């Protein structure tokens, strides 16, 4: 079985998959459009990071794919609805780089409060400006965390160790860690916080969630940090707030439009603003995080391809079968309508094939069936794959 890993995914993923017996081709770059479609024709599975976009059109032209691995936290670069309807489970690594992002955020909190980047730049230019003006300790200040998930909670723990007071807001009820405190609304958080850090997904609800009203609600002289998604903050509004002094500084790691590669020029209106830290989407880019992501997602791909396990798939019914396959394991993804299991069992029974075990899980749209069967499966497999309800059928 051939697997393509794009965008210079960590070598540990290559090694792990090769050790499991897969043929792996490792590409340093991303591909797009027709070039991507041509590449994918030769593979049964693909691993990507954030630059490769698997749109509905590309997935329809690549319906032979058995699975997709996103070697990152986010999956917004994949059309998940199309992937599910084509019977292609998508796996990611939602927890592997949480510590890396959280550490960067705390680093930026201190750097912003001390004007560290501007001071460093001046010294590099040969200028000596020793002054305490505009420089503060973070101890005793309040940090507001919007989005109290895996990263937000890590930020909460680290922030307390620095003596910061922690408040948070999340759309769902979350258990506070340590001495952190939940607030009732995003505006209550913005009013109270000296530092505001964002850790939310990219959804229609979060687009420009920090705009004119929200920034006006923030304390004068406060700081804003965004290491979540580039569409969450209205950068033009932020720029004005920085220029007129309402915001004392900001740190941005993600942008609405980002360069395709490291050789492309990046331009942004915030580049001329004082006390603004701009980083090239490196929140999760540590060696430890990339190693962990490589291990986690490669394991998920192998578990699916070798035994049909979908635990951790972001848009598929989650199934954890027994490790031992008794005979051959039939994988069938089908439309979730009444009578499908009966039809499949009838085909298998008429073919005289013994069923050793079967496991079915469904959601609103699809059903996912694992069936361990004995020999004589070729004709039955063909009949099952040609059912009007079948989306994808294969044996492992």
Image (spheres, rainbow, N blue to C red):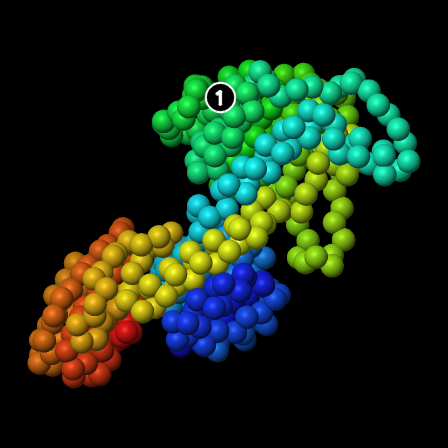
Indicate whether 219 appears above or below 83: above
Residue 60, percent across and down? 44, 67
Q: Is residue 63 visible?
A: no
Front residue of 19/247: it is 19
From the viewer's perspective, is 350 left or right of 161? Answer: left
Disc 1 secondary structure class: strand
Q: Quadrant of the C terminus?
A: bottom left
Residue 102, percent across and down? 54, 37
- Residue lying at 11% horizontally and 81% vertically, measured from the top left: 351
- Residue lying at 91% horizontally and 35% vertically, measured from the top left: 126
Residue 343, percent across and down? 14, 69
Q: Badge 1: how crowded within 10 Å, few (<14), some, or many (20+)?
A: many
Q: Is residue 313 visible?
A: yes
- Residue lying at 42% horizontally and 56% vertically, measured from the top left: 296
Location of mark 1 (residue): 167
From the viewer's perspective, is 34 left or right of 12? Answer: right
């Amino acid at each position: 079985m051939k697997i393509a890993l794009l965008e210079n995914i960590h070598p540990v993923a290559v090694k792990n998959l090769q050790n499991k017996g897969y043929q792996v081709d490792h590409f340093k770059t991303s591909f797009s459009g027709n070039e991507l479609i041509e590449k994918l024709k030769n593979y049964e599975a693909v691993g990507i990071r954030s630059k490769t976009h698997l749109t509905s059109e590309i997935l329809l032209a690549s319906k032979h794919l058995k699975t997709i691995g996103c070697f990152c936290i986010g999956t917004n670069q994949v059309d998940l609805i199309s992937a599910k309807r084509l019977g292609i489970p998508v796996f990611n690594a939602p927890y592997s780089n949480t510590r890396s992002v959280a550490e960067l955020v705390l680093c930026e909190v201190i750097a912003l409060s001390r004007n560290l980047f501007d001071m460093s730049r001046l010294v590099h230019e040969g200028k000596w400006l020793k002054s305490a003006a505009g420089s503060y300790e973070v101890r005793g200040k309040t940090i507001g965390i919007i989005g109290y998930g895996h990263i937000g909670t890590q930020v909460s723990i680290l922030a307390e160790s620095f003596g910061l007071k922690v408040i948070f807001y999340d759309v769902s009820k979350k258990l506070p860690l340590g001495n952190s405190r939940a607030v009732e609304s995003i505006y209550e958080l913005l009013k109270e916080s000296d530092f505001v850090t964002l850790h939310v997904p990219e959804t229609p609800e979060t687009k420009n969630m920090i705009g004119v009203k929200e920034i006006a609600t923030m304390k004068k002289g406060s700081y804003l940090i965004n290491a979540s998604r580039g569409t969450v903050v209205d950068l033009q509004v932020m720029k004005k707030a920085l220029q007129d002094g309402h915001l004392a500084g900001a740190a941005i790691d993600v942008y609405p439009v980002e360069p395709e590669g490291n050789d492309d020029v990046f331009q942004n209106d915030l580049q001329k603003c004082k006390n603004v830290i701009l980083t090239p989407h490196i929140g999760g880019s540590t060696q430890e995080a990339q190693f962990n992501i490589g291990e986690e997602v490669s394991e998920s791909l192998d578990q699916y391809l070798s035994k049909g396990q979908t635990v951790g798939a972001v848009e598929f019914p989650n199934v954890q079968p027994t490790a031992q396959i008794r005979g051959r394991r039939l994988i069938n993804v089908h439309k979730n309508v009444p009578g499908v299991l009966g039809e499949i069992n009838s085909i298998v029974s008429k073919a005289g094939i013994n069923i050793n075990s079967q496991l079915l899980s469904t959601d609103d749209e699809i059903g996912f069936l694992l069936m361990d069967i004995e020999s004589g499966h070729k004709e039955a497999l063909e009949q099952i794959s040609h059912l009007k309800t079948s989306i994808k059928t294969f044996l492992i």
